[in-house]
Amino acid sequence: MKITKDAEKLEFYFNENITAPIVKDLKEEIKETLEQNNEYNHVVANLSEVDYIDSTGITLIIGIYKSVEESGKKLTVTGAREEIKNLFSIIRLDEIFTVQ
């Protein structure tokens, strides 16, 4: 995962499938980053390199949303493949945060 930030936006660029074996490490890194960087007001989860996300990965995205929302900030998921967008739609996550 690559992390970029500027004055307004913090972006998590996922460069592999988001599945159970890697979620624990990702979760720790994301948590640290969110706690250390509070000047942003928008978080982007860029999934353009993700071919597959399992239920544990979806839980990770929901966790990011909860952390961001608690601080009054906004989450957008970008670059998701059509299959992943459909999954977010089926479970209605696209009604909770923006999925592009």
Image: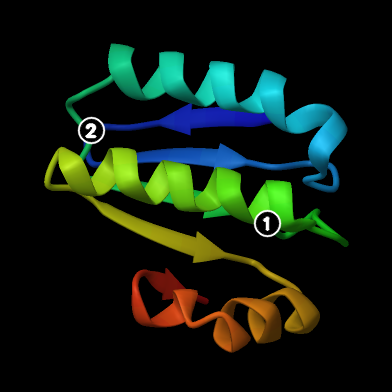
Q: Tell me the SS state at disc 1.
A: loop
* Relative horizontal placement of residue 69, taking residue 32 as reference (left or right): left
Residue 33: x and y, percent? Answer: 42, 19
* Relative horizontal placement of residue 61, taking residue 7 as reference (left or right): right
Residue 9: x and y, percent? Answer: 32, 42
Q: Say above or below: 95 vs 11.
A: below
Label 1 vs label 2, nearer the camera: 1
Find residue 97 and report its image quarter. Answer: bottom left
**Circles 1, 2 touching at the beta carbon (< 8 Å):** no
Query: What residue do we see at 50% from left, 25% from top?
Result: 30
Residue named by callout 2: 7
Q: Quadrant of the N terminus?
A: top right
Looking at the image, tell me whether mark 1 or mark 2 is earlier in sequence order.
2
State how far apart marks 1 and 2 are (Cα). Answer: 22 Å
Residue 87: x and y, percent? Answer: 68, 79
Work out whether residue 3 or residue 29 is closer to the camera in this orientation and state it. 29
Residue 62: x and y, percent? Answer: 47, 52
**Residue density around tag 2, few if under 14, some if 14–19, many if 20 or more, within 10 Å:** few
* Relative horizontal placement of residue 14, taking residue 52 as reference (left or right): left
Residue named by callout 1: 47
Query: What residue do we see at 47% from left, 41% from top?
Result: 11
User: Residue flagged by tag 2: what amino acid is it?
Assistant: Ala
Query: What residue do we see at 56% from left, 17% from top?
Result: 28
Q: Say above or below: 55 vs 32.
A: below
- Residue furthest left in the image: 72
Find residue 2 and report its image quarter. Answer: top right
Query: What residue do we see at 84% from left, 42% from top?
Result: 16
Q: Tell me the SS state at disc 2.
A: loop
User: Residue flagged by tag 1: what amino acid is it?
Assistant: Leu
